[in-house]
Image: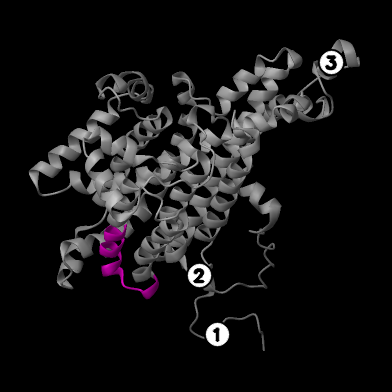
Amino acid sequence: MDVSAPPAGTPASFVSPGMIAPEPAPISTRGPIAWSRAHLFGSPFQIILTLFGLAVIYVVVPPVLRFFIFDAVFTGTGRNACLPEVIGRPVGACWPFIGAKFNQIVYGFYPEAERWRVNLVYLIGVVLLAPLMIQKVPYKRLNALLFFGAYPVAAYVLLTGGNLQLRGFLLSWVGLGPLVTTIGQAIGFSTGFWPDYVISALLVAAIAAAAAPVFAGSRKGAAKTALGAFVILGVVLAAVDINFGLPWVETRVWGGMLVTLVIAVTGIVASLPLGILLALGRRSQMPLVRIASTLFIEFWRGVPLITVLFFATYMLPLFLPGRFTIDGLLRALVGVALFASAYMAEVVRGGLQAIPKGQYEGAQALGLPGGLMMRLVVLPQALKLVIPGIVNNFIGLFKDTTLVLIVSIFDLLGVLRAAFTDPAWATPTTVVTGFGFAGLFYFVFCFGMSRYSMALEKRLDRNRRH
């Protein structure tokens, strides 16, 4: 029997007369070769772009490495260590300059004996922030309460000394000084009847009262209890001049990384909640709230940040009463926070507009009131959608802190510029070294925020996972 013959009734054109030749092995879709074929050499246009990128890397990277590493000077005690005519070779970065000015770069002109307070603020901030950023760490609510509630107060007390003197300043300005003094004398505040540790115990009790509902899991009562505790805390602070035993350090001697981080962190932390409120206000059905929010956003978005800083620093004191003054750094902080919140509001509003109408209808079908619908259904989805825009604003704000140098607040770049004037380190490469160090500092923080936002997007993008 002929096995090659087709079965009866089968057209001969549909049957191969012989065995089919084996096909080549499939192209690998994994590994560096497959990745290069798909992303670098997949088409003639990709090949051209790859070659152009390699040419740019060849032109830029070797000189940078040569200046900052291979030809750099790493040891020395003065400008002679970084002069080519002294050491007899080409000189790149003068890293001994950074080492000699490092304390000034980190602390500015903060008193040397009190710099442990700055270090403690840095340490507490890292210890509280790291668990917030790691998903698997428990007690997120307690951690957030400590970071956003207790940490700013502790940082203020440590950095400034914490002696508010509200009774003698603020209340006397509003004309209630004699009344509060009389009441204080009647209950023993002014005569030293209540020692400092009693006042400290009252403050701890107020904070514990605010935190108790959070620990117990009662979200509804947490806000009311916290508000009442802070009102009581404000009355205590207004009636008593608390002395924490720390020397007062004026903000005008702050500088360097300290000022940069204080302005950036304050602006970032304050701009997000304010931006959310402004975005909700702009979409509100109440005309007064909507118009006020719109005017606020458009005003701050229409004014350059440098103008805001100039107004807050030089013009605002002209409108204040004679004896009433506001710290210069505080004015800059408020201006930066309000400016950033206006931009943040538009980012959040874009996320709110991207939520489908069905989400609102579904929440209403469940019987959720407007506040819960927004807080539990709409707003979380909107914020997830605009994570890139939010982090982009954060990065821009972090870099915009350099503008405070215009109003004589010495941030990182301001301290570096002051250090450049030291004749003991006047070399041809000192300025480039300083700005290179500053660029590395900003790159590390900005790149870190960018990578964390990408990881957060990937973790929250559950609806697109396969």
**Horizontal side of residue 110 vs 409, given as left or right:** right
Front residue of this view, candidates 78 and 47: 78
Residue 291 spot, x, y in % from top left: 13, 38
Type of amino acid at the residue the image marks with label 3: Asn
Q: Which residues are magenta?
A: 215-229
Front residue of this view, candidates 418 and 57: 418
The reply to whether residue 255 is visible in this rendering is: yes
> Mark 1 to mark 2: distance in Å?
72 Å
Residue 432 spot, x, y in % from top left: 68, 20
Q: Residues within 10 Å of mark 1 (few under 14, many from 20)?
A: few
Up-down relation of residue 292 to residue 218 (above or below): above
Q: Quadrant of the N terminus?
A: bottom right
Residue 382 spot, x, y in % from top left: 31, 54
- Which type of secondary structure does the marked residue at label 3 adopt? helix
Residue 138's disc is: 2
Up-down relation of residue 13 to residue 296 (above or below): below
- For this orientation, the residue located farthest to the left is 287
- For this orientation, the residue located farthest to the top is 85
At a point 35% along the width and 30% down the height, the residue shown is: 326
Front residue of this view, candidates 257 and 455: 257
The reply to whether residue 48 is visible in this rendering is: no
Camera-side mark, 1 or 2: 2
- Quadrant for residue 78, please give it: top right
Front residue of this view, candidates 122 and 241: 241
Type of amino acid at the residue the image marks with label 1: Pro
Type of amino acid at the residue the image marks with label 2: Pro
> Mark 2 to mark 3: distance in Å?
54 Å
**What secondary structure do most residues of the magenta stretch adopt?**
helix
Q: Which residue is mark 3?
A: 80
Instruction: Name the N-terminal-most of marks 3 and 1.
Output: 1
At a point 44% along the width and 65% down the height, the residue shown is: 142
Q: Residues within 10 Å of mark 3 (few under 14, many from 20)?
A: some
